[in-house]
Structures are given as structure tokens and as C-alpha cells.
Amino acid sequence: MDMQVAKKKLGLKERYAVMTRGLDWVPSYQKMEDIYPYMSYEGIKIHDWDKWEDPFRLTMDAYWKYQAEKERKLYAVLDAFNQNNGHLNVTDARYINTVKLFVSGISPLEYVAHRGFAHAGRQFPGAGPRVACLMQSLDEIRHAQTQVHAVANYNKYYNGMHDFHHAHDRVWFLSVPKSFFDDAITAGPFEFMVSIGFSFEYVLTNLLFVPFVSGAAYNGDMGTMTFGFSAQSDEARHMTLGLEVIKFILEQDPDNLPIVQRWIDKWTWRGYRVLTLVAMMMDYMLPKRTMSWKEAWEIYFEENGGALFKDLARYGITMPKCAEQIALEKDHLSHQAWSTFYNYAAAANFHTWVPDEDEMAWLSAKYPDSYDKYYRPRMEYWREQAAKGNRFYNKTLPMLCQTCQIPMVFTEPGDPTKICYREVDYKESKYHFCSDHCKAIFEHEPEKYVQAWLPVHQIYQGNCFPEGTDPTVEGFDPLAAVLDYYHFESGRDNLDFEGSEDQKNFDAWRGMATKNV
Amino acid sequence: MHIDLRTVTIKPLRHTFDNIARRLGADKPATRYQEGTLDMQQTANFHYRPTWDPDHQIYDASRTAIKMADWYAFKDPRQFYYGAYTMARAKQQDTAEANFDFVENRNLADTLPADVRATVLELLVPLRHVAWGSNMNNASICAYSYGTAFSQPGIYQAMDQLGIAQYLTRVGLLLGGVESLEVAKTSWMEGDAWQGLRRYVEDCMVIKDPVELFVAQNVALDGLLYPLVYETIVDDVLSAKGGTPVAMLTQFMTDWFTETKRWTDATMKTAAAESDENKAILAKWVIQWRDRAAAALLPVARIALNERTDALVAEVVQQFDARLIKSGVPL
């Protein structure tokens, strides 16, 4: 062989191709269907994996270099934040409840995403999507860990997040985000990619990730803000992957269209229901608001999402039908959610409160068609009652929707005075739903959704008490037993913000840090 | 000398999360490795069974025959969480990049003796496919094993192996151009010397037990391949023939193996120490996969070692056995 021949120079695209798909081969000692056993049962048809367009071209050397640089900066900020009592710089102590909601509701999902993308990144027969998924799997463990590390400092000083892993697997409202991700990772690999890669990362990320990070930035939480900004370029990669997945699947075979459309419909709705928690966070929990839930929905879904679905129309994809109902709910969602948590504050790991006069004025201005008419009177009444020493805590357990697992508190589309109930009879049992969309999701896959671990059912069945509890003894307090099972410290982790240990400590500590007394 | 900078001190309510305190036995400050690892994986009240594996929960310890009272008994001695991992690799990447630059800028590739160059192209370049197989197998380990302490290093190992496959690709491009990659792929697919190894790698891809896969891939195959190829062939045999630039191009792999075997050894030690039953299963797997790996590597090693092959492979196997026995696996 003549070694002096000038070597062919590769372009970037070709170079990336030899660095990834060039490594792959068609096996002959084992069958394709044994190596990639989950590729056919969802009904998606892929004819040519080589048609996959790599959404980003990052080799491992470059990945390590960029990511390490970001990590160095992030941890330098976190260290400074910890050393300098950064937690005392937040707008007011109510803000910290957002952090509690985030670490117990959202951070564990980053971890599931990590495992889910490892699974998808193993199972696709195409080398291109496998590499992209594995890189996302690696990013997702980054997000889970940096969030835990950022929140670790808050946990040292404030209540409600001291056992968040334990809580995530058990607490009634945390089954909403948990069941969402459990639903995605137990679906087939293609549906997982549409649910998380596309619907969640691409369509809804601006309504989840962005509000939390912007909220942190607006409220002086440098730790959370920094991990958020540090994750931004990762998220951008994930979004391009999500979009490429959809386009690739749709371009491969026309039979894929109805399947993908159904998944988009389902996951937009599933995702939106999880965003209920974000909606109330934006409108009620951030002392300094970034924008209202309604505005966020209009900008990020109706405008941006509208443009996206217009773009996807050439594949035959249409705007999910549930968007119509979501538009009807946008004046109500956050208020109904906050009211629910205000009711159940004895059983939550964060504090609730009635908005103050200025905040009510903000809500009236942002929700001129609904707040004063339906929600302000209710909140003013609660405020009056609390002032008289009658802070109301609801101790009766609510009925949950079998699909989204949110208490059945949402109203009929178009009639905010009437609770929406739907039901289905299936194999001698009755199942309840908050909406037509949750009902339709159940009806398509009843065998999946009958398995749901519904917290309220489980409590009533006696499965949510500490081991050895005897519910038949006189004076048995079921709520106290459930809180024990959750590892909540009643009186510290739960109840109203007013009078809480968090409130007192924050005031005292801020005084120590700013005054000489 | 000591200077006393003052900060406002507030007594914290607690030093770490409760789950960590329970494991440490006291509420004391935890490391970032501990906070980023312990109990990260969900353990209870899963909502649905995987449609792709209805016999198991989403995370299910019964996917493996190995039994552990506590899957967080495993500890990565490198204490790798994402930040520590990427920073360690970025540093190695800096060295690797400097090495590639050094070899390229001085045209050291052109000074390689022809037989060394031929050996590198014939032996090292097809190994990029082996590393790619390991990428897939470690993705499996990460996805289907139980407990973050065990699963987390799986994703790091998977991406390391992708990195190694890419370094080997660059070695091929540097020494033989893009054609060398095609030649190497043909050897991998059709060459007699490679079929045992390819069969081994493909057989690993259908192993369902994540700990067995860990043994087959990370313990047995890599435990023989890296000492044989990078420590014995590249660093000794080829260097002695004027192939030192090759050792520079593969320094990442040599350093990487020295580092990662601390993790594989610690993992084997913990699993074996758990019970006699585990010991017996691990020993069975190690022996079975070691023998297959050694046999598959013989014809590959022969490319560089010729008549010394049997002796050197035997030596590597002997060292491997000593390593495993030290980890408490009865061979």
C-alpha cells in the first residue's frame, strides 16, 4: 500500500458520520429482532434508518470539553451561593416553596428521563438516533444532579424538601408528575420519544423549564437560575432531537401518521395537566411574577406552538384537539389549582397562603374575565376566616382522575361553576375522569391505566400508613398516619405560610445578615 | 499564617437530605457524589408496567440473578457524578488533543515503520467496532440495572466507549485515511481473525441480565482486551519497534483502563462479598466469558504478536485471574 497518497479530507458531516454511524454494522451472529426486540410492537414502520438527519454533531471530545466548562462555572456559583447565604437574597420566604415543588415534583423526572433515554438509546436500530439519545441520557443525569446540588443548600435551612425522593414515590399530588413519566417510560421507545422528546421537550419546555428558571431569576435565586441557564444549551439540543424524531418517523411511512397524531394529542394533554402545577406556581407562588400563566400559554403554545403545527401540517399533523379546551381553561387553571392546594395544605410539603391585596390586584388585571368574578370572593372569604382563627384545612380526600391523577377539581369547559366529571365502566369497575381527554386516553389503553397507583385509593385501602399501624385503635388519626408515611413533619413541612417556621427563620436570619442587633 | 475572613454564620436546621442521613447513620455533610447518587432512582409505587417488558417493574432488581440486600452498597471509588466525570474526561481530552497535535504537526505518522503502521491499521482500527458494541452494552447496563449506584457508571462507561471508538477512528484517519476505516470494517465483518470477537460482542447484545452483561463486557472482555492491546502490544511491542507515536495516540485508552478498572473491581468485590450465592454466580460468569474472550482475542493478538501470542495472552489471563481473585471472586 502506498502511504504517501494524499488523504481524502472529510467534511464536517462526513467526519461526524464516520465517528458515529460508521461504527455500526449489521449483525450476523444474532438476529436484528433479538438485538432490538422492541422495534415493531408499536406499529411504527421505519424503512431506512440512514435517512435520519443528525440534529447536532457533537463528538465525545467536544462534548466533554464544553460540558466540563459549564460544570466548572456552575459549581463555582453554587459554592459562592452556599458560602454567602445566597438563600437570604430571595424576594421573600414564600418563594422557597417553589423550590420545594421543583425538587420533589420535577427533579426526579429528570432522573427518569436519564434512564428512559438510556433505554431508547439502546433500542433504536439506527446509530444516529442512538447516539443522540444517549447524549441526552447523559445530559439528563446532569440536570437531576445539578438540581439536587443546587437545592441542597435550601434544604439545610428550610423545611419541606428534606426527604424529597421518598415523597416523590408516595405523596398524593406528586403522583401527577410521577405517573406522567412512568407512563412515558413504560410506553414503547417510539412513543417515549414522541412523549418526552417531542411533546415535553419541544412543545412544552418553555412552559415548564423556562417559568421555573425565569422565576428564579426574578426572585433572586441565583442557585436555581444558574443551573437553569447552564442547562439551556442542553435543552436546545434536546429540542432539536425531539423535532427530528417527529419528522423522521413521519417521513418514513404514511402509516405512521395516525399513530404519531394520537401520541401528540395524548401527550400534549398529559403534559398540560402536569403544567397545572406550573400555572399555580407562576400566578401564586412567585412573589415577583414573570408573567401570568395565561400569557405564557398564549405566547409559548398558541403562538409558537401554532407556528410549529403549521410547519408540521405538510406531514399531515394537525394541532391537538385538546388545545381548544386548554384555551377555555386558561382563565381558570391556576386559580382552581391554588385553591385546591390551599385546601389541602395540611397534606402538602409546601406552604400556601392567600394572596395579598397587591397580588389580588395583579390577578384581577391579568385575568379580567375570571378572577374577580369567580376566585377573588373565595380568597377574600378564606382571608377573613383565617383572620378570625378559622384557617380552613380540608381533611376529606378528593376523588382523583384515573389518568392524570389530579383531584377532580376542574370545571366544565365553558362553565366555571360546575365541576367536570366523566366516567367509564370497564370490567366491572367504574373509573373517573376530570375531562373528555383523560377519558379518551384511558379508553384507548384501559389495561395500562387501570394499573395506576392512585394515592387516594391507596390511602383508603390502608396502604399509606407506616408499617405496623393499626387503624382500628381508638382515636386513630388517618391524616397523621399518612403524613408519617410521607415522612412529613406536621407543623413544619405543611400548613399555612403565615406562622410557619420557614417564615420566622427567614425573617430572623435576614435580620442577622442585614442588621447589627 | 492564617487570616480570619468572617462571614455571617447561620446554624442550619440539617446538613443533608434525610435519605442520605439515614444511609450515613447521622445528619452530617454529604459529598456531591452521595447527594447525586443515593436513592436517585425511584423505588416504590410505580404506576404502570413497561409495555416492552410486562414481567418487570420499570426498575426491577429481579432483572439480574445477583441479589443484593441494598443496591447502594455499590460505590464508585472514582466518586463520579456528572460534574466530576466530565471534568475528569475533559482533562484527559486535553492531553489526548495535545498528543494528536504533537503527532500530526511533526508528521510522526509518516515516520512510523511500515510494519508498525500496517499492524496499527489492521489491529487497532477494527477495534472501533468493539468499542461501539461496548457503548451499546453499557447503555443496556445503565437502562436495565437497579439502583443509581450501579446504573450511573454505566452511562459514563457507554459514552467513554463511544469516545474511544472516535479516537480509534481518528487514528485510522490519521494513519490510513478514510479508506482504512472501510478496510477495517471489512475485516470486522469478514476477516477470519475477527469473527470470534464479533460473535462475542453480538452475543453480549442479547444478554438480558444487566450484571451478567457487566461481567461479560466490562470485566471479562475489557479486562483482557485493554491490557493485551494497549499495555502489551502498543506500549511494549510496537514502541520497541519505533511505534511510540502510536502509544501517544492511545494514551487515553491506557489511562482510562487504569482508572475504570478501579470501578469494575470495586463493583465485583461488593457483589461477591454479599453472599456465597453471588460469588458462585459471578465466578461462573467470569470463567465462561473469560474463556470465550481469551479465545476470541487470540487471533486478533496474533496480528501483532505472531509466535509470542499464546504466551502473552496466557500472561494477560493470569493477571486477570489474579485481579478477580483479589476482588473475592473464587476462580
Image: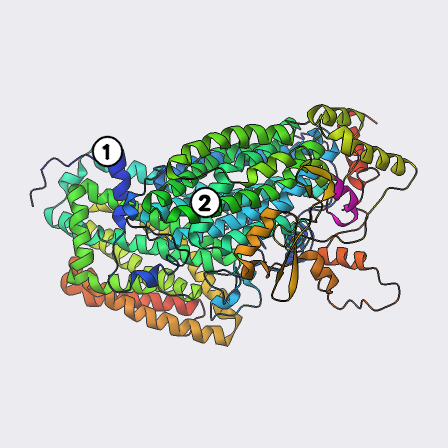
Labels 1 and 2 positioned on one and the same chain:
yes
Q: Earlier in the sequence, mark 1 or mark 2?
A: 1
Q: What is the three-letter code of the residue carrying label 2?
A: Gln
The answer to if A348 sits in the magenta stretch is yes
Is residue B223 visible to us here? no
Drawn side of residue A45 relative to residue A341, left or right: left
- Which residue corresponds to mark 2? A261
Mark 2 surroundings: few (<14), some (14-19) or many (≥20) residues within 10 A = some
The answer to if A283 sits in the magenta stretch is no
What percent of the width, then of the height, locates residue A37?
Answer: 37, 61
Q: Residue at x 16, y 36 (%)?
A: A8
Drawn side of residue B185 relative to residue A451, left or right: left
The dot on residue A205 is: none
Quarter that holds the N terminus of chain B: top right
Circle 1: element type: loop
What percent of the width, then of the height, locates residue A334?
Answer: 69, 36
Main secondary-structure element of the magenta-colored stretch: helix
Alpha carbon of mark 1 to alpha carbon of mark 2: how far? 37 Å
Q: Chain of mark 2?
A: A
Q: Residue at x 37, y 35 (%)?
A: A314
The dot on residue A11 is: 1
Q: Nearer the viewer, residue B284 or B241?
A: B284
Magenta stretch: give its range. Answer: A339-351
Q: Residue at x 31, y 37 (%)?
A: B97
Drawn side of residue B106 relative to residue B16, left or right: left
Disc number lying in front (1 or 2):
2
Q: Nearer the viewer, residue A365 or A412?
A: A412
Q: What is the three-letter code of the residue carrying label 1?
A: Gly
What percent of the width, then of the height, locates residue B88?
Answer: 43, 43
Quarter that holds the C terminus of chain B: bottom left
Is residue A387 visible to us here? yes
